[in-house]
Image: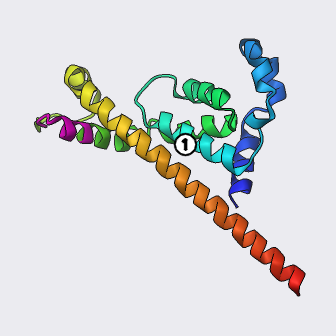
Amino acid sequence: MPRRLFRKIQRRMPDKGKMSAEWYLRPFNALLHDPGLWSIHRRGVTKAVAIGLFFAMLPIVGQMALAALVALWVRVNLPVAVAFTWVSNPLTYVPIYYPAYKLGALLLGIPQENSGENPMSIDWLWSELVTIWKPLFLGSGILAVVTAATGFAVLNLAWRLAAFNRLKRLRRRTAS
């Protein structure tokens, strides 16, 4: 089951032939021909998911580029690492970063005042940016580590269970 899911994800990503033809990726052509970046196996995909989830939880610019660079460095599935950074998108910013800010503020002991303004609105963000960046980055860092570790463990377990069930079905078919 996990292998089929990741094959679907990989089909939606550009293939390595098209990527190597792009002018801005030519310096990386030697790296992009590594088969480990494109193969779908448990170790490569679970690590790629962890990398993608880690960078998705950080409130930084260039999440996809950073995930791609780390995937190239670690030599894990590149499309999966990039695709899992899409967990954070404009629809999920508030559900991800507001609890991260709350966690960081709690750990730093920063009192959370409840003004009449809507928290996490653009006006509030610009006026409070100086005071919220420390708790936001602390909470996001903790959330990134926990989310990446959880994603890695859950996917690894799901992949192993699927392989075990496939082997069990195969043994039942050959025994009959």
Please say whether residue 9 is one of the residues in the magenta stretch.
no
Q: Is residue 85 left or right of residue 99?
A: right
Location of the C terminus by quadrant is: bottom right
Q: How many marks?
A: 1
Q: Which residue is mark 1?
A: 50
Q: Is residue 118 visible?
A: no
Magenta part of the protein: which range? Answer: 103-112
Amino acid type of the residue that numbered disc 1 sits on in the rendered structure: Ala
Q: Residues within 10 Å of mark 1 (few under 14, many from 20)?
A: many
Location of the N terminus by quadrant is: bottom right
Q: Is residue 144 left or right of residue 156?
A: left
The residue depicted at 75 percent of the width and 22 percent of the height is 31
Where residue 128 appears, x then y in whole percent? 20, 24
Secondary structure beneath dot 1 equals helix
Is 36 located above or below residue 126 in the figure?
A: below
Where residue 32 appears, x then y in whole percent? 77, 25
Please say whether residue 104 is one of the residues in the magenta stretch.
yes
* Residue sticking out furthest to the bottom: 176
| Residue closer to the observer: 124 or 7 | 7
| Residue closer to the observer: 170 or 119 | 170
The residue depicted at 25 percent of the width and 21 percent of the height is 126
Where residue 101 appears, x then y in whole percent? 27, 37
Q: Is residue 35 left or right of residue 73?
A: right
Tell me the quarter of the picture where residue 76 sits. top right
Q: Is residue 128 visible?
A: yes
The residue depicted at 55 percent of the width and 38 percent of the height is 52
Q: Is residue 58 left or right of residue 36?
A: left
Is 49 located above or below residue 25 in the figure?
A: below
Is 51 located above or below residue 64 in the figure?
A: below
Where residue 57 appears, x then y in whole percent? 43, 37
